[in-house]
Amino acid sequence: YTQFLQAASSLLQAGAAVGAMLLAPFFAGRLGRREAMFVGVLVTIAGVIPCMLVTSYTQFLMARFVIGLGVGNVTYALPIYIAEVAPAQIRGILGSMTQLSANIGQLFASIMNLNPGFQYWMSFSLPSFPAAVVALGIFFFPMSPRFALIKFKRLQKPEEGVQRAKNSLRRLRGNEIE
């Protein structure tokens, strides 16, 4: 049983490493930071659902790796997005709040697991709730101004990139300059 728990934890971390180092740079660099987060939460949810339902160790361990891929995507893209959209005065605190939120979520899950009536599948369902909130809400936020400039320069439409970046800044801060 101990080896199974070790494998389940390790595979999630391995998936997160692969997701952050190999997949997320592609998604965040080509599709955008919001889009990379969206892909990450969809992949996370796609791994969480089998964890709640499967009865085979192998399938469970594979699902844990898939969850890790999604977590790695979000862990990579979210700090980049925050850094690119936040005003300089609060950029650091927002980055810190991201980590604090993750730690509070882990504490909450650990406390929930102390309850004997809290079944194992409920524990594995917990990551799907913040993932669903992100999936439903991420496109209400504007494109990163920096990514708009990069994307449209790559598409050889720099003027459109400047316009989209200005629109994002207006939407985020009420003006085009910080």
Image (cartoon, rainbow, N blue to C red):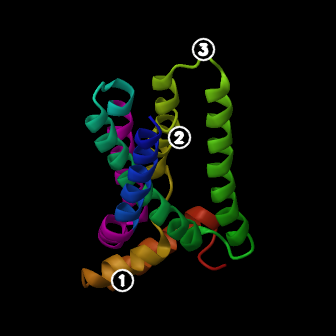
Query: Where does residue 85 sit, x and y in percent of width and height?
Result: 57, 69
Disc nearest the viewer among 2 and 1: 2
> Which region shows up in magenta?
21-49
Q: Residue furthest top?
A: 117
Q: Give neighbour class at mark 3: few <14, some 14-19, many 20+ (Cα, 10 Å).
A: few
Earlier in the chain: of badge 2 and badge 1, it is 2
Q: Which mark is residue 130?
A: 2
Q: Which mark is residue 92?
A: none
47 drawn magenta? yes
Earlier in the chain: of badge 2 and badge 3, it is 3
Q: CA distance from mark 2 to mark 3?
A: 22 Å
Q: CA distance from mark 2 to mark 1?
A: 36 Å
Q: Give neighbour class at mark 1: few <14, some 14-19, many 20+ (Cα, 10 Å).
A: few
Please give the residue where the numbered disc 3 appears in the rendered image: 117
The amino acid beneath tag 3 is: Gly
Look at the picture and state if 111 lies above or below 161: above
For residue 124, side relative to residue 107 (left or right): left
Residue at 53% x, 40% y is 130
Asked whether the residues under the numbered discs 2 and 3 touch, taking CB atoms below 8 Å apart as contact, a structural biologist would say: no
Please give the residue where the numbered disc 1 appears in the rendered image: 159
Query: Where does residue 28 sit, x and y in percent of width and height?
Result: 37, 68
Residue at 26% x, 38% y is 58
Q: CA distance from mark 3 to mark 1?
A: 59 Å
Image quadrant containing the C terminus: bottom right
Residue at 37% x, 70% y is 21
